[in-house]
Amino acid sequence: MSERKSHRKVFMIGGIAAAVMFAFCFAMVPLYSLICKKTGINTSAANSGLLTSVSAETKEPPDLSRTITVQFVATNHNGMPWEFFPRTKSIKVHPGENNKIFFHAKNTTEKTMSVQAIPSMTPTDALSHFHKIECFCFTQQSLKAQESKEMPMIFRIDKDIPKEIHVITLAYTLFDTTPKEARKGS
């Protein structure tokens, strides 16, 4: 009997832990927004995450003596049924020049969905030197059933980026932000 109680306790603790982790996954985007709002990160509509946006205009010529490889990665959170990938996997850029690439997104479901792309970057030393001028990640994206979209991102890397940085990886994770009422209706 004691062994049965022990097993029941393990299953209850495991079930509660799984439920908490599952709830945390759904709360991640609103939690991220709340943290950004409270800490002052991402306070304008033009910023997303720790990556900053800047004006499209630049008065100084790019640093043609340096080349940095920028790699792009895209993933869907929790098996979300969308196609989401960068059209360009990596490019070589010069610090100080504007660069434009596209990400492809397709809603492969039979219902309208909204999503939010959350960025991350390595190495973290590059964060303050990487500036997005235009990005799909600034706002939520909504696509109707089977609709697809080419989403641009224009960015620039500061000329004062540390000399030891030769490769930057920018990753986006796509989160489902469809309102709960719309999810139930399908």
Image (cartoon, rainbow, N blue to C red):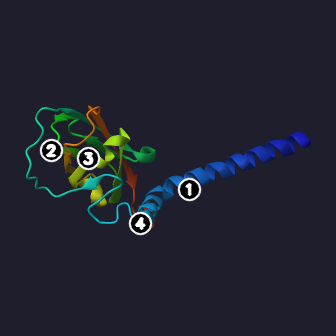
Q: How many marks?
A: 4
Residue 23, percent from left and from top: 56, 56
Residue type at numbered disc 3? Phe
Q: What is the secondary structure assignment of the residue under circle 3?
A: strand
The residue positioned 24% from the left and 50% from the top of the image is: 131
- In the image, which is nearer the foreground, mark 4 or mark 3? 3
Q: Which residue is mark 2?
A: 96
Residue type at numbered disc 1? Ala
User: Gap between marks 2 and 3, in whole Å?
Assistant: 10 Å
Mark 3: few/some/many CA within 10 Å (<14, 14-19, 20+): many
- Which of the two labelled residues, at mark 4 and mark 2, occupies the earlier sequence position? 4
- In the image, which is nearer the foreground, mark 1 or mark 2? 2
User: Gap between marks 4 and 3, in whole Å?
Assistant: 21 Å
Q: What is the secondary structure assignment of the residue under circle 4?
A: helix
- Which of the two labelled residues, at mark 1 and mark 2, occupies the earlier sequence position? 1
Residue type at numbered disc 2? Gly
Residue 22, percent from left and from top: 56, 52
- Which of the two labelled residues, at mark 4 and mark 3, occupies the earlier sequence position? 4
The residue positioned 49% from the left and 56% from the top of the image is: 26
Proximity of marks 1 and 3: CB atoms separated by less than 8 Å: no
Compared with 91, 103 (above or below) is below
User: Gap between marks 1 and 4, in whole Å?
Assistant: 21 Å
Q: Which residue is mark 3?
A: 130
User: Gap between marks 4 and 2, in whole Å?
Assistant: 29 Å
Depth check: give the residue in front, 184 or 65. Answer: 65
Q: Which residue is mark 1?
A: 23
